[in-house]
Amino acid sequence: MAAAAAAGRVIGRLGARLLGVVSLAVAAVGFLVPVLWSGTTAMVTGVSVAAAGLGGLLLSAP
């Protein structure tokens, strides 16, 4: 929810396309964290970062 609120403030300055690209990149990094490292901390961190990216992506979708 925090990422979607922040994306709502930034979308006017960046535009929907650039916000979507950045959000997808953040989500990809978040999904990559549990792949590269094992453990509960890596899983929670990765899923949290990925959720932030997806929150921004859903706001930038038409």
Image (cartoon, rainbow, N blue to C red):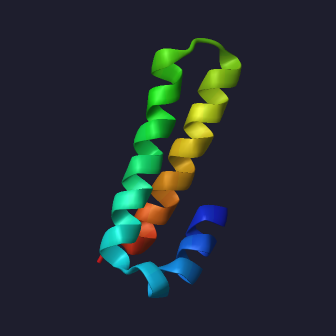
Q: Nearer the viewer, residue 54 or 19?
A: 19
Instruction: Provide residue 58's location: percent of width, then percent of height.
Output: 42, 65
Name the residue rendered at 41%, 69% in the picture. Answer: 19
Q: Looking at the rendering, in which quadrant would you find the N terminus? A: bottom right
Name the residue rendered at 47%, 48% in the picture. Answer: 26
Vertical order, 37 against 49 (above or below): above
**Left or right, 25 with reference to 46:** left
Residue 22 quadrant? bottom left
Query: Farthest top residue?
Result: 38
Instruction: Provide residue 43's location: percent of width, then percent of height.
Output: 60, 25
Residue 59 quadrant? bottom left
Vertical order, 25 against 14 (above or below): above
Q: Is residue 40 visible?
A: yes
Query: Farthest right residue?
Result: 41
Instruction: Provide residue 62's location: percent of width, then percent of height.
Output: 29, 78
**Left or right, 12 with reference to 45:** left
Vertical order, 25 against 9 (above or below): above
**Left or right, 55 with reference to 1:** left
**Left or right, 57 with reference to 3:** left
Instruction: Provide residue 20's location: percent of width, then percent of height.
Output: 36, 65
Count every numbered label the image shows and give the total.
Answer: 0
Query: Farthest bottom residue?
Result: 12
Q: Is residue 1 visible?
A: no
Vertical order, 20 against 25 (above or below): below
Name the residue rendered at 35%, 77% in the picture. Answer: 16
